[in-house]
Amino acid sequence: AFEKTLNTEVIIPKYYDVMGAVGCCYLAMKATQNKPTKFKGWRAAEFNFRPTSFECQGCPNLCEVIQIYENDVVIARWGDRCGKWSNASLSSEVS
């Protein structure tokens, strides 16, 4: 019915169920081509990661800020609504 409506042959690839994932990966590859990434390698599961959290007292929101440490260095933060912590330089703490 679809071919008849479009008046063209419809080709269904063998791996049709993952075509969106393949396309997404292709677009990501093109977007990051010749640019450095933060990929830590396939052995990242063996690294010493430590999650912590704290309640920010900077405003009435009292956001719970999550931090991820790698070897005692903060490598990621999220959970704040205002961006005070997630937008801060990860190499130094914000007072």
Image: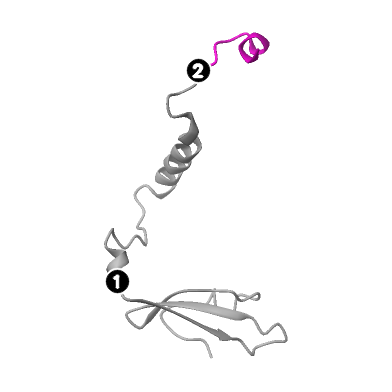
Split into 4 quadrants, where in the image is the C terminus? bottom right
Which residue sits at x=47%, y=86%? 93
Q: Does the magenta run of residues contain 8?
A: yes
The label shown at residue 12 is none
Which residue has dot 2 on it?
A: 11
Q: Secondary structure at mark 2?
A: loop
Q: At label 2, which amino acid type do we have?
A: Ile
Is residue 30 inside the magenta stretch?
no
Residue 29, image x and y in percent? Answer: 40, 45
Instruction: Give the residue pinned by disc 1.
Output: 47
Alpha carbon separation for disc pair 2 and 1: 45 Å
Q: Is residue 42 visible?
A: yes
Residue 83's spot in the image, x, y percent?
60, 75
Return the x and y of residue 16 as percentages of the image width and height.
Answer: 48, 29
Which is more toward the observer, 38 or 46? 46
Q: Is residue 85 above or below residue 21?
A: below
Q: In the displayed orientation, state which residue is furthest to the right.
A: 60
- Answer few, some or many: residues within 10 Å of disc 2's Cα (few below 14, many 20 plus, some between 14 and 19): few
Identify residue type, mark 1. Phe
Q: Secondary structure at mark 1?
A: loop
- Along the viewing direction, whichever of 62 and 58 lies nearer the viewer: 62
Res. 89 in view: no
Residue at 73% x, 86% y: name it: 60
Say which quarter of the image contains residue 51. bottom left
Q: Nearer the viewer, residue 28 or 49?
A: 49
What segment is highlighted magenta in the picture?
Answer: 1-11
Q: Which quadrant is the N terminus positioned in?
A: top right
The residue positioned 31% from the left and 63% from the top of the image is 40
Of callouts 2 and 1, which one flags the residue occurring earlier in the amino acid sequence? 2
**Residue visible at 43% across and 84% down?**
92
Q: Are marks 2 and 1 in contact (CB under 8 Å)?
A: no
